[in-house]
Structure formats: structure tokens, C-alpha cells
Image (cartoon, coloured by chain):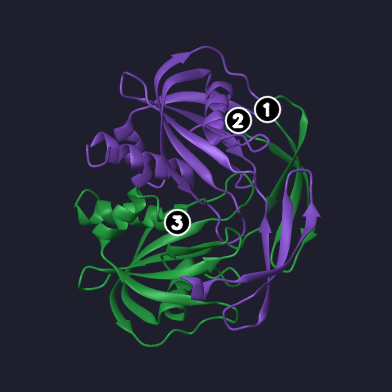
Chain colours: A purple, B green
Amino acid sequence: MKHLEEKTLSSKQIFRGRYLKIEQDEVQAPDGKTYVREYILHPGAAMMIPLLPNGNVVMIHQYRHAVKQVFLEFPAGKRDHGEETILTAQRELKEETGYEAKEWKFLTTIHPVIGYSNEHIDLYLAQDLTVSAQQLDHGEFIEVIEVKPDDLMRLIREGKVSDVKTQIGAFWLDKILRGDWN
Amino acid sequence: MKHLEEKTLSSKQIFRGRYLKIEQDEVQAPDGKTYVREYILHPGAAMMIPLLPNGNVVMIHQYRHAVKQVFLEFPAGKRDHGEETILTAQRELKEETGYEAKEWKFLTTIHPVIGYSNEHIDLYLAQDLTVSAQQLDHGEFIEVIEVKPDDLMRLIREGKVSDVKTQIGAFWLDKILRGDWN
């Protein structure tokens, strides 16, 4: 696939907001010409599917101002200082839901915004769960709920779970629970 | 879900790059306090699953500089001037792959970046395909390939299709082809 790659000629951070940072690169494309590419610099993230002994998954309702909707999501969060994403996952599960898991399994890595962000999200399955109390960050408002995997798949089909990381997590769980993937 | 919502107090565009635009809003959260939210302003997009009579899907290889990798993707593109996404889908399928489809079916809407972009992508199934020539945009380098749906699912499981819109499209197609969803 080398023949499709672009060569970075120069790279500079052109914007730093309160939360978002933008990088602007000059690249040489396969046609030999120079183009400008812009993208968000993101630290990377982790998401987990917390699967309870009763077969339900632990999910959250969270308002997302960028889209101005409340979303049904799996818990997730950004990496702190380049930590390994398994640590991010363990921290965020505890903070957002109050749950802790003894059994963790890495599932896959996804790229949500290949057009304009270097973000990646590592997905984990979290089992053997115990619950204590949420420890929400300042400015975070999250409601924890239990959902049956079958209901989650129905909601996806009805267009009611449009967050991509959550939808992908649900499809992976569906494959695992059906015994297609292990 | 009203009790999780935030009220927009003020809104301003704080950055406009060559391609990216950032909005910064002041919001009043459920705790009554004021917080700052930043997000990319995006026109919305369309993606399609072009399904051939031989059972294969038409996909593309494209280098994505933000992640510095070549991705296996379904064809997709941004809306022009708020056009309906079915028109975006028809235009982009032709431009990126050279294919045209007579039969279009809307599947679902996804939100890839609920943390920091208002982007939405409408997913379509495109059938009854005929092929002519690609009409790539300036600075676009795309290779068209045919993939068997079973191979696509195997590649996803192996972590080789990490683009979220493509992975979600593949899972929807899998449900449709198995007769679980129609």
C-alpha cells in the first residue's frame, strides 16, 4: 500500500483551544504535489463493555453538547499522560459507573475519525464486576443503567444508539454471545 | 432525559483553518454551573455499502494522514451545501469508485465523534450497480477493490478494519445477509 502513502514535509500546531488542539501538516502526495492536511491531536481513549453475571451490560446516559443529544453509551474515557489503555479503562469504569472488574479482555482498536483526528479507542470486555460509587469528573453528568444485550441490538436497529464506539462494542458482544467469535 | 441536558448560553466560532472549524460554547450544566464546550463544525456525510450481484462489496483503499495509515473503507464523503445525504451518497459513489447504483436503501445514522464534533454519517445500501470511471477530487488518491463479506468480517475480527463507519457498515450488512435484519 506504499504507493498510496503521503510523505510529511512539515508539521505545526496551528490551534490550541481549551480542549482541542489542531495540527496542520504539509504533505507530498502520490502525484508528487504538495497538499495541506489538518487534524485534531488526541491522546487516545479506552471503552469497555461491562458484562454482569445476570447477562446485562452496564451502560450510561450522557448529554453530548457537540451533537446536543443524550446518548446511550458504553463507559469510556481519554488516556491520561499516555497511560496504557487498560489502565484508562479500569479508571474510567470506576469513575463513570462505580464498577470495578477483575477480568479484562482486549477486543480491538478502532479509529473513529480518520478524516480529521488521530484518535484511537481500545475496546475491552470487562467481567467479574463489583460495584461501589461513581467518582465523576468536574462537569460530568452521567446516569448508569443496565441494558439487556438483545434490547441493545434492537435499539441499534431502530437507530437509537448512534454513537459509533457503543454500536461497535454491541456488535462485538453480539458475536461473542452468539459464539461466532471468542 | 431532560435532566441531563445542558443549556447553551453563548456560542462562537473560535477557529477556522483551511478545512476545520471549531465552535466554542458556554453552557449551563445540570448542576447550574457554567462550563466551556468545544467541537468541530462538520457538514455531515454519507457512506454507502455497494453490494454487487456476485455478492462482493465495492471498497476502497485510502491513505489517511491524520492516522498515517492506509485504510480499507466503504466509499463516503461530506455533504455539499447541506444537500440531502442520498445525493451525497450517489455523488461520492460515482466519484470515488466509478460505480452508479439504481437501488438505494437508507440503513441508519451514526455519530462518530460525540465528544468533539457534530458530524453525522448516513449509511446506505447501494445495489443494482453499473460501473464507469472514477472522478477523484483534487488531492484524492483511492484504489477500488472488491471484497467478500465473509473476508470483511474476518478482517474486522483480526483488527484490520479499524475505521468505524466501515466496521459498522460491515456489521449491518452481516445482519442483513444472515436474514436477521431486513
Vertical placement of B50 versus A92: above or below? Answer: below
A142 to the left or right of B124: right
Q: Camera-side residue: A1 or B20?
A: A1
Residue at point 51%, 32% (across, down): A86
- Residue A46 x, y percent position in the rendering: 53, 37
- Residue A97 x, y percent position in the rendering: 53, 22
Distance, label 1 to label 2, CA atoms, is 6 Å
- Residue B99 x, y percent position in the rendering: 36, 80
Distance, label 1 to label 3, CA atoms, is 32 Å
Visible residue check, residue A160: no
Say which amino acid is labelled 2: Leu
B151 to the left or right of A74: left
- Residue B89 x, y percent position in the rendering: 44, 70
Vertical placement of B162 versus A51: above or below? Answer: below
Label number found at residue B165: 3
The chain carrying label 3 is B
Task: Pick whichever of labels 1 and 3 is earlier in the sequence.
Answer: 1
Label number found at residue B30: 1
Distance, label 3 to label 2, CA atoms, is 27 Å
Task: Pick whichever of labels 1 and 2 is earlier in the sequence.
Answer: 2
Residue at point 71%, 24% (across, down): B31
Vertical placement of B139 versus B122: above or below? Answer: below
Label 2, on which residue? B4
CB-based contact (under 8 Å), mark 1 and mark 2: yes
In what element is the residue under mark 1? loop
Q: Residues within 10 Å of mark 1 (few under 14, many from 20)?
A: some
Direction bottom: furthest residue: B132
